[in-house]
Amino acid sequence: MQAAAVRSEGLVIPLIDFSKFLNGNPEQRRETANAILHGFQTAGFIYLKGLPITSEYRKHIFETSAKYFRLPDETKLSHCWTTPQANRGYSAPGREKTTSLTDPEAVKKLRDAVPDLKESLEIGREGEPDHPNHWPEEEGELVGFKEIMLDFHTKCKDLHMEVMRAIAVGLGIDETWFDNYTDAGDNTLRLLHYPEVKKDVFAINPGQVRAGAHSDYGSITLLFQDARGGLQVQSPTGAFIDATPIEDTCVVNAGDLLARWSNDNIKSTVHRVVEPPSGDGDVYPARYSIAYFCNPNFKSYIEAIPGTYVAEDDRKYQGINSGQYLVQRLATTY
Ligand code: FYU
Ligand code: NI
């Protein structure tokens, strides 16, 4: 039986060894692909282990990320996030409010009442003339920052392509079917810091969270989390269930555009970040995580994947341009 990372209230999130897809024999590849697709069709979430990312490398990325957030506020604000089209740069606590709401007034009200308790730096594909990344000065602790983050961006881009290949195998279409949709690397690396916070902030404000309930926008998200905890995934009963960190794994979830692309064959599941299960004294310690938001190439036109519908009128959605879709989604939360 497939190992589970989470099993509660009808939510079963499988724990899958991805090295069996990357390096296994044809049968292992097929079985692993099927397990991955099944996880996305049921929970919308999977945990992957056996990734081509060593724990030393991962530790280095997290340490480098923490160094960034130790910069003075005014320095970070000089890298600030500007527009949904660029989707790059620094967002101070309170800037973005993740939510399922779409009405701008309602989002504003929610943001003012219970701002998300996080700060982030978004790093996009390097070399886009209209949308440069906002890099910190390479001095002091941050020497080498750009190089390591771009290297990680590339590793995650490759991982996106491999996970989409696994989905293709699971769906029974050509293994490389998605390659032309994933090779541009129009993805966003987001470094996240949830600062240490007094416990009574959560007690005083009902509805206070570190990141509001939402589903992701693109194809898939690769989430690397530290050992702190706080990520929760919504179960079929509506309850939010802890997606407890497991060392050297990556949590992967399907986004809304992949759900739409697959004619709702794959699920994009709501999740949020709340205070961790524990903490010393009267504070919850800081949490660091790194999300890599993957998107189909921005120039791609996204309409139902072959095999996810039979008759023409089984198609539930209009085709849509990937880049336009993302911009429209980002415009509601900032
Ligand atoms: N930013 N994609 C997402 C997201 C934020 O899915 C992105 O680029 C969700 O919080
Ligand atoms: Ni998310």
Image: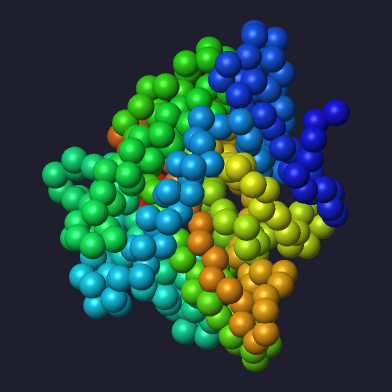
Residue 65 location, x and y as percent? Answer: 39, 58
Where residue 263 appears, as percent x and y from the top left, is: 59, 34
Up the image or down, 241 lies above or below 302; here it is below
Q: Quadrant of the N terminus?
A: top right
Q: Nearer the viewer, residue 39 or 334?
A: 39
Q: Residue at x 32, y 51 (%)?
A: 123
In this view, the residue farthest toward the left is: 129
Q: Nearer the viewer, residue 35 or 214?
A: 35
In the picture, the quarter occupied by the C terminus is bottom left
Instruction: Say whether residue 162 is visible.
Output: yes
- Name the residue located 78 percent from the left edge and 62 percent from the top edge: 239
Give left or right: position of 182 versus 141: right
Q: Residue at x 32, y 31 (%)?
A: 184
Query: Is residue 141 depicted above or below 163 in this figure?
Result: below
Q: Quadrant of residue 307?
A: top right
From the top left corner, tell me how far across and down residue 125 is, in percent: 28, 42
